[in-house]
Image (spheres, rainbow, N blue to C red):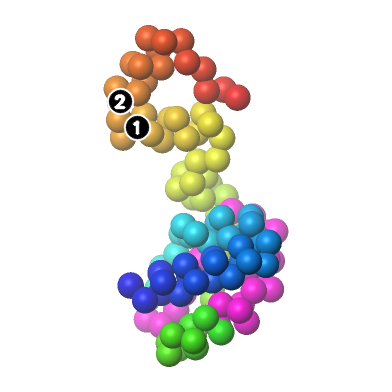
Amino acid sequence: MEVKQVFADFVQDLYKRNQKSLAAYMSDPIFSYTEGKISLTVGSKTLKNELEEEVKGLSRMFRKRGLHFPGLDLKIDALKVKEYKPFTPKEQFNAAAKDHPILKDFADRFGLDFDV
């Protein structure tokens, strides 16, 4: 999908400008691209504000690839983002254990604790 490649280019540009937290989010965003509209779900107002400041750069990336930039619809939904992107070690372990139940047995057997 061409939009994903534009996001990848945008992420590289953000890293070059040392905007690591925004780049980390944009490397795997919760987005949809339907009917010429890009919708992004972000987890905080801070992230939403940062993205609003970067709209011109994202628009430039679209034009560079010969695509129409329809604008950006940003929604804040911390719970949805937390489900999609686990942040703490415990959340990451639980997400992995949901897909691979053997990990729970492994952690119990060896007394591993992910409450850090």
Q: The residue tagged with tag 2: helix, strand or loop?
A: loop
Give the spatial CA distance, label 1 vs label 2.
Answer: 6 Å
Image quarter in which the N terminus is found:
bottom left
Residue 39: x, y in percent? 48, 70
Tell me if residue 114 comes above or below residue 15 in the rendering: above
At x 52%, y 23%, the residue is 114
53 is higher (above) or lower (below) than 107: below
Question: Left of 96 or right of it: where is 102?
Answer: left
Q: Name the residue located 52 percent from the left edge and 81 percent from the top edge.
A: 61
Residue 34 image point, x, y percent: 37, 76
Instruction: Point out the residue furthest to the front here.
Output: 16
Q: Which residue is mark 1?
A: 98
Tell whether 32 sits left or right of 74: left
Q: Residue 57 or 41: which is nearer the viewer? A: 57
Is any part of residue 41 visible from this angle?
no
Question: x, y (%) of residue 9?
Answer: 50, 72
Which residue is the site of mark 2? 101
> Per the image, is 103 magenta?
no
The vertical placement of 70 against 98, above or below, is below
Q: Amino acid at mark 2?
A: Pro
Quarter holding residue 11: bottom right
* Residue at 37 percent of width and 9 percent of height: 109
Query: What is the three-letter code of the residue carrying label 1?
Result: Lys
Residue at 57% across, 22% down: 115
Magenta segment: 35-59
Q: Is residue 46 magenta?
A: yes
Q: Secondary structure at mark 1?
A: helix
Whether the residues at callouts 1 and 2 have beta carbons within 8 Å, the answer is yes
Residue 58 appears in which quarter of the rendering? bottom right
